Image (cartoon, grey):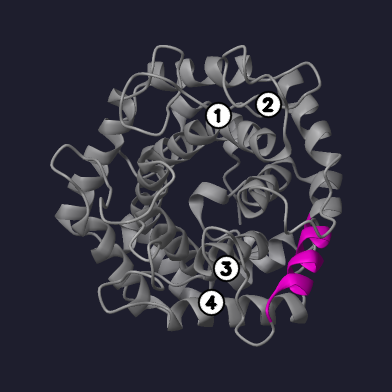
Amino acid sequence: MHRMNNRDCHWSDYPTLNYFVRGTILAAGLCILQTELFSNESPIITKESQLAIDTGLAYLAERQNENGSIGDGAQAENVGVVSLVGIAFLAEGSLPGKGKYGSQLRKITTFVLSHCQENGFITNSNAKTHGPMYGHGFATLFLAEAYGAYPKSNLRKQLAKATKLIVDTQNKDGGWRYQPERNEADISVTICQVMALRAAKNAGVYVPNKTIEKCIDYVKKSQNRDGGFRYQLTAGSPISAFPRTAAGIVALFSAGIYKGKEIDQGLAYISKNRPNIKLDESHYFYGHYYAVQAMWQAGGVFWSNWYPAIRDELIKSQDQKSGAWKDQVSPEYGTAMACIILQMPNNTLPIFQR
């Protein structure tokens, strides 16, 4: 059985994935086949980590409201958080209307589509958000991953419009910022848009090569001499940090750059920040969400050293009574991120596949 290697081609040559076939294969037991394929090169999900995943996903399912939103309070209607919960369910192997969390995914898909504006912007003005383009990026990513199992014309139409909005709001340096405007840019918002564009491209939506080339240039310019990444290109934000460095490397991977000094130096920087129970640190789940993707794509010793550490750390930090993980954003956000991280070896989602 041959597995497509993303490194075999540049993004402009990347073949469209057949999402309809994907849905059928998943239903037939793709997870089992992939476990056999990768058991020799990556740590297997242990009984303890599978229990943590199961209880975490059950918590998210219990927290879903009838309209598809998740939890309560200001973050319940946040399209970004709701979409990340959807991605956590997709990573388990479920699809909208199919599998253990099929009903939850169908509600999430309906919720996200209900907040698509005419210009393609996916946002909910009633929800608390640090920056609406974060939510738009995660929501676009979710729609692209769910597309094949929810082949309704309105989803395809909204996915294309959401993708075009990202393309149209890229700033002159090649990045994106909080609002859908061509003004400032930062590495954190930019990675959300790059992953959304890659997922949309995989689903057959048109993405101009020029958009990706400008993005690659922006991300590379954001790297400091120590291998870490700065928040913005402006002189006032030159400090490297773990979360944005992980995001920067995944941005390059998502854009089709898998080799080079930027990758080598970035991975070395990330490796200095091995998981060690720092749940009070800023942007913990955000950083590890991208770090586990970076190490998964890098493979080899990067992955074999990293995954067991973050896996064991997350198992220890889970609330054993509720199954949730706490975070300053919301427990639903923290739990979704933790479940995505722990399920990376499943290799079920096209956007995360090597």
Residue toward you, 61 or 163: 61
Residue 150 placement (x, y as % from top left): 27, 63
**Which residue is under mark 3?**
335
Which numbered disc, 3 or 4, marks the residue closer to the eye? Answer: 3
Residue 187: image tag: 1
Total marks drawn? 4
Task: Give neighbour class at mark 4: few <14, some 14-19, many 20+ (Cα, 10 Å).
Answer: many
Q: Main secondary structure of the magenta part?
A: helix
* Depicted 323 relative to depicted 335: above or below: below
Location of residue 324 (image quadrant): bottom right
Question: Which mark sits nearer the N-terminus, 3 or 1?
Answer: 1
Q: Is residue 135 above or below residue 318?
A: above
Sequence-wise first label, 3 or 4: 4
Marks 3 and 1 close (CB-CB < 8 Å)? no
Task: Determine contact: label 4, label 2, CB under 8 Å.
Answer: no
Q: Which residues are magenta?
A: 307-319
Horizontal and vertical percent position of residue 59:
52, 80
